Image: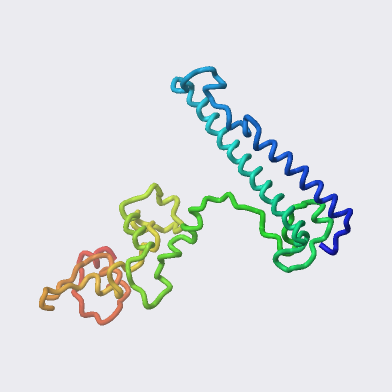
């Protein structure tokens, strides 16, 4: 406090004491920011059961507002008592982060200041839903696509499985204007699910690894059309007739 003159310190102390008395009077008030009243007292009825729902909604809003005002007043009172205690111990007016003197101009504007402007905690509180911290980025906490050592069923795969059963989207909402079916609208609809190479999805054997069977699915037709691998697979007359 050495950077503050006696007159400045006395002025700040007087303001703190005055604000403390006002807050204590508000907190001791009979209505306690309105918390002392109720809907039944306002309407003169014993029960609010038959009242319009809007009346009850207004009452709930008012009680929430009153609680917030009372809590805010108590926080202000705690800050004032802390500042007066710091004055008594010689710690007032010193930044608790840097140990440097807090300018008198800042203390004059906010006598309960504990930090200088450079080290003042952020007072801006976001009103965004807390769920966004958990949901952002999409699949960001469970996506294994970028990890070469992970192949398990992740959050994105779970959504893709649900999406296959249909959504409210239509082909007109697709980013790809060339979609031919609703199944192609899904996120990464061309992703291999359950296999790595396309050939694994249409070649099957029995339990002993014999009797190879070719399943002519979309992957099989795309494989033949792109002429991948050795031409050892049976031709598909139906597919060739479409060309």
Measuring 21% from the left and 67% from the top, which residue is drawn there? 216
- The image quadrant of residue 89 is bottom right
Q: Is residue 46 left or right of residue 204?
A: right
Of all residues, the one furthest to the top in this rendering is: 44
Q: Nearer the viewer, residue 101 or 243?
A: 101
Q: Nearer the viewer, residue 43 or 186?
A: 43
Up/down of 100 relative to 28, above or below: below
Relative image position of residue 11 (x, y in whole percent): 85, 50
Where, quadrant-wise, is the N terminus in this rendering? bottom right
Up/down of 238 relative to 42, above or below: below
Measuring 70% from the left and 66% from the top, which residue is drawn there? 97
Relative image position of residue 149 (x, y in whole percent): 37, 78
- The image quadrant of residue 101 is bottom right
Q: Is residue 34 left or right of residue 98?
A: left
Total marks placed: 0
Relative image position of residue 124 (x, y in whole percent): 65, 53
Q: Nearer the viewer, residue 75 or 13?
A: 13
Q: Is residue 209 left or right of residue 112?
A: left
- The image quadrant of residue 68 is top right
Q: Nearer the viewer, residue 169 or 96?
A: 96
Of all residues, the one furthest to the front in this rendering is: 88
Where, quadrant-wise, is the C terminus in this rendering? bottom left
Q: Is residue 52 left or right of residue 69?
A: left
Relative image position of residue 173 (x, y in whole percent): 45, 51
Up/down of 25 relative to 196, above or below: above
Q: How is the image coloured?
A: rainbow
């Amino acid at each position: 406090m050495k950077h503050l003159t006696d007159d400045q310190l006395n002025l700040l102390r007087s303001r703190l004491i005055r604000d403390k008395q006002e807050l204590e009077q508000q907190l001791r008030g009979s209505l306690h920011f309105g918390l002392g009243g109720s809907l039944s007292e306002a309407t003169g009825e014993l029960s609010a059961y038959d009242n319009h729902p809007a009346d009850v909604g207004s009452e709930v809003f008012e009680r929430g507002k009153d609680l917030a005002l009372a809590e805010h007043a108590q926080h202000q009172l705690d800050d004032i008592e802390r500042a007066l205690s710091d004055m008594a111990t010689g710690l007032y007016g010193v930044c608790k982060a840097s140990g440097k003197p807090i300018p008198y101009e800042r203390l004059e504007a906010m006598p309960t200041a504990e930090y200088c402007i450079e080290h003042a905690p952020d007072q801006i509180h976001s009103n965004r839903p807390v769920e966004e911290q958990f949901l952002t980025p999409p699949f960001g906490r469970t996506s294994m696509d970028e990890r070469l050592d992970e192949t398990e069923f992740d959050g994105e795969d779970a959504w893709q499985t649900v999406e296959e059963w249909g959504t409210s989207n239509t082909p007109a909402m697709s980013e790809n204007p060339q979609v031919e079916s609703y199944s192609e609208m899904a996120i990464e609809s061309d992703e291999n699910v359950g296999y790595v190479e396309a050939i694994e999805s249409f070649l099957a054997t029995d339990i002993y690894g014999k009797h190879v069977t070719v399943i002519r699915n979309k992957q099989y037709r795309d494989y033949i059309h792109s002429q991948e691998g050795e031409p050892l697979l049976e031709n598909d007359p139906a597919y060739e007739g479409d060309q």
